Amino acid sequence: MNNGSARSLLSLFLLSILALALMLLTALGVYYIAAPWFLPRSSSASAPPAASLSAGAAAPTPASAAPAAGSASLAVPLTSAQQAQQQREDTRFPFYSKLLQQSAGAINSAQEQKGEPATLQLFFTGSNPAVVQQALNVLVLPDAYQYGFNHIRIYLPDPSNLAEGDRLYEEANRSADGSWQLFLR
């Protein structure tokens, strides 16, 4: 075999390896582009929703909404307690949204207190008592009971105690006659 034919065989071999690599890359590219259209999508979420709505985050959808497209996670069955919490939070979502939207930035977060589903925790962005009372009287108290709350805890920022964060400012309890009793802390 002469030197010219060895070179041509080597170049033919290298070209065939290059062509094979290009075909493999093309196939992988087509798979990654087209696979999401053909893979099955999960139909339920794997965990209950967070039990709060914060002003800084994008508004989540209720847990009953479908998961994001392309989600391929396995659905984990929820316990009866998790199902009850999920149903409660789905029902309360419009209330949380209303509080954040209509408070003009005064309320930073609204959530059920962990372990106490009838207690609403409200975290305010400022510490102006007039703003707190206005929001409480106009936005919270008229509707809180119909969303299953009979106790409300109001938290204000505490700049003197950054380690703790917020301090309990006020509580409200719903009495048997339907009126709310307010207690400053």
Image (tube, rainbow, N blue to C red):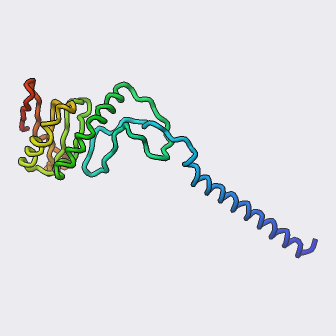
- Height in image: 7 above or below 16? below
Residue beneath the point at 13% across and 40% down: 168
Furthest-right residue in view? 1
Q: Does 23 sit left or right of 113 as displayed?
A: right
Residue beneath the point at 58% across and 46% down: 38
Position in image of residue 90 (x %, y %): 31, 36
Dividing the picture into quarters, in which one does residue 150 lie?
top left
Q: Does 71 sit left or right of 58 as displayed?
A: right
Work out whether residue 67 or residue 5 is closer to the camera in this orientation and state it. Answer: 67
Position in image of residue 157 (x %, y %): 15, 48
- Height in image: 38 above or below 25? above
Residue beneath the point at 24% across and 39% down: 111
- Height in image: 128 above or below 179? below
Position of the N terminus, as image quadrant, is: bottom right
Furthest-bottom residue in view? 4
Dividing the picture into quarters, in which one does residue 40 lie?
top right
Position in image of residue 49 (x %, y %): 35, 38
Position of the C terminus, as image quadrant, is: top left
Work out whether residue 66 or residue 119 is closer to the camera in this orientation and state it. Answer: 66
Position in image of residue 170 (x %, y %): 10, 39
Residue beneath the point at 26% across and 33% down: 114
Q: How many marks?
A: 0
Q: Does 116 sit left or right of 80 as displayed?
A: left
